[in-house]
Structure formats: C-alpha cells, structure tokens
Amino acid sequence: MQAHQERRLAGPPHQAVAWTHLQGPDESELGQVLRHYDISWSTSAETYRATFDRYPEFYYVRFYGFAASDPTDLMIAVPVHVVVKSKVVISWCPRPVTAVDSVARKVDAHPDLIHNGHTLIFYLLDEIVEDTFPVLDVFNDRLAIIEHDVFAPGPRQRAIQQGIFRLKREILTLRHIVASERDVSYQLVRYWDTIDDKSESREWTFQLYDHVIRLFESADIYRELANSVLDIYLGSVSNRLNEIVKKLTLVTVLFVPASLVAALYGMNFDYLPGQHHPWGFFLVVGGVFLISLTLLAIFRQRRWL
C-alpha cells in the first residue's frame, strides 16, 4: 500500500466545500473514499490525454502536471484526477504535485475564494497550468545548451543528436497533452456556464481556457524552436562533412602527380627518360615535389585550404 495523505479544506460555514486529496492511493483506498461520498466511479485506462466526463450527480476531470527541475532531467507528466460532486471535491495523483499544495495554502489564507466545488477545481486546474510554464523555461535552457554544443568542436555529435530528438519527443508529448487540456477546458467552460449563479462564474470560467490556449501556443513555439535547432545541427553536420571531403579531395589532388609519374615509370619499356642518368631518380622526384608545391600554392591562393 502506497503512502497517502488526506487534506480537508472548507470555506465559510454557509459555503462549506470539503476537499479530500489522496496521494498515491491504491484502488481499494480510492474506492473507499468514493463510496463514502456515494460516488460510483471506476478507474479507466490511463492515456496521455486530459479527460472530462459528466455524470448525473458529479463530473470527473483529469489534467496533467509536469515536472522538470533541471536542464538535464526528463520531463515527467503526473496525472491529477478530480471528482466534483456538489460541495465535495475529491482529488488524487500518483506522486506529489506542487499545484495541490499551492492551492491548499491559498484556500487556507483566503477561504472566501471558494464559493462552490467548481471554483475550487478552477483554482486547482489553473494552478496546474501555471506550473507548466516553468517547464517551458527548462526547455528553453536545454535548447540553449544544445545550440551551444552544436557549434562547439568536439566528438559529441551523437550525444547532441540524442539530446535534440529527446527534447523534441518531450515537447511533442507536452503539446499533445496540452491540446487535450485545451479541449477539456472548453468543455468545462461550457459546463460551468450552465450553473445557476452565472454572475459569479463569468469572472473565472474563461480564465482557465485562456491560460491553456496561451500554454498551447507556447508549446507550439518551442516545437518550432526544436525543429530549428535540429535544422541547424543537420546543417552544421553537412558543412563539416563538406569541409572534410574538400580537404581530402585536395590532398588527393596533391598526390596525383606522384601517382602519374609512378604509373608511367612502372611500365615495362626498354627506354624511359632519365632511366640511365645518374641523377634521373632525384630529378623525377624533384619534379613531382615541384608540381605538388605549385598546386598547394594555387590552393592556398584561392583559399581552398
């Protein structure tokens, strides 16, 4: 059985919203809490998508919190499940999420913020979205490190390539989740807009949707930045390869005269120029060196080397 904690919060007596939060509960613990509030609901298959399900007496929402505390850390997506029934809010997650503690401190300090279960879940989901923006800052730091490594000399090309593709996968995963949260936020806005007291709800119903839209646009920007970094990396690799091929080609050209002379003097003829001359060998070798040095001077003059 995993360790868990329960937290119960309440606003003013006439509003009395009870919030029970469980951290890392197993199915029996979760079922016991849900049955205590007469909620009949069973867990569904876990996917990296936010979810909104509406039932006759309650509704269920699943959002995702993200964690990436260091530029070298992998992004971790933590599902936060919430069930709202009248004045009762039940939430649970498999590991700690900072948004839960932040909302708990906010409600403790300002209990008059909570008018009903809908406002409590709004503050919780909105805090989850706000906590995702620092993850984008971590992505920005990792992109800056990769950009620096792309132009830095050294045999780290494979590590750079792996870092770029890993970052792209993480950004695409975040974008995929945030896209589903955008759809869920819109469904929640339409649902919250149907509650009786619209004068209070209109102050915050669209705030969550606006924040998710802003987060989705930011994730899109970082996806484009990751693609740009990948293009820069591939371009730098291509440029390095071209430089290597060019230098190898020029070195090969420098040895062409020597290869040609060696091929000619390797023929089986009775007479070859300078064959019987006492300085013939040195003259031929000197001529080869002279031609190679002339080619080298031409290459340097044209800045090919």
Image: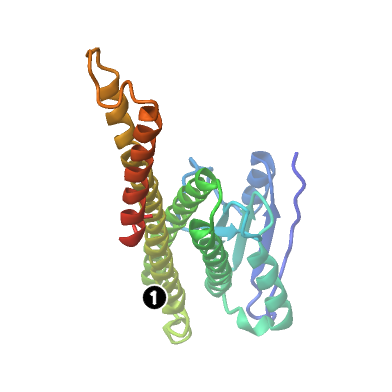
Q: Which residue is drawn at 68% across and 59% down?
A: 21
- Residue 250 screen position, x and y as percent: 34, 45
Secondary structure, mark 1, is: loop
Check disc 1 and report the residue beneath it. Answer: 193
- 106 and 198: which is toward the camera: 106
In which quadrant of the rendered view does residue 180 lie? bottom left
Q: Where is residue 272 in the image (x, y as percent from the top left)?
A: 24, 21
Can residue 150 be seen here?
A: yes
Image colouring? rainbow
Say few, some or many: other residues with alpha carbon within 10 Å of mark 1 (under 14 / 14 to 19 / 20 or more): some
Give the quadrant of residue 231.
bottom left
269 w.r.t. 129: above or below: above
**In the rendered view, would you say 267 is above or below 94?**
above
125 or 190: nearer the eye?
125
Q: Is residue 147 left or right of residue 295?
A: right
Q: Which residue is drawn at 69% across and 83% down?
A: 110
Q: Is residue 250 visible?
A: no
Instruction: Give percent across and percent down for residue 121.
Output: 55, 68
Tally the marks: 1
Q: Which of 248 and 224 is in front in this view?
A: 248
Q: Where is residue 258 in the image (x, y as percent from the top left)?
A: 34, 33
Given the image, on which type of amino acid does mark 1 rest? Asp
Residue 204 appears left or right of 127: left
In the rendered image, the quadrant that contains the N terminus is top right
Q: Quadrant of the C terminus?
A: bottom left
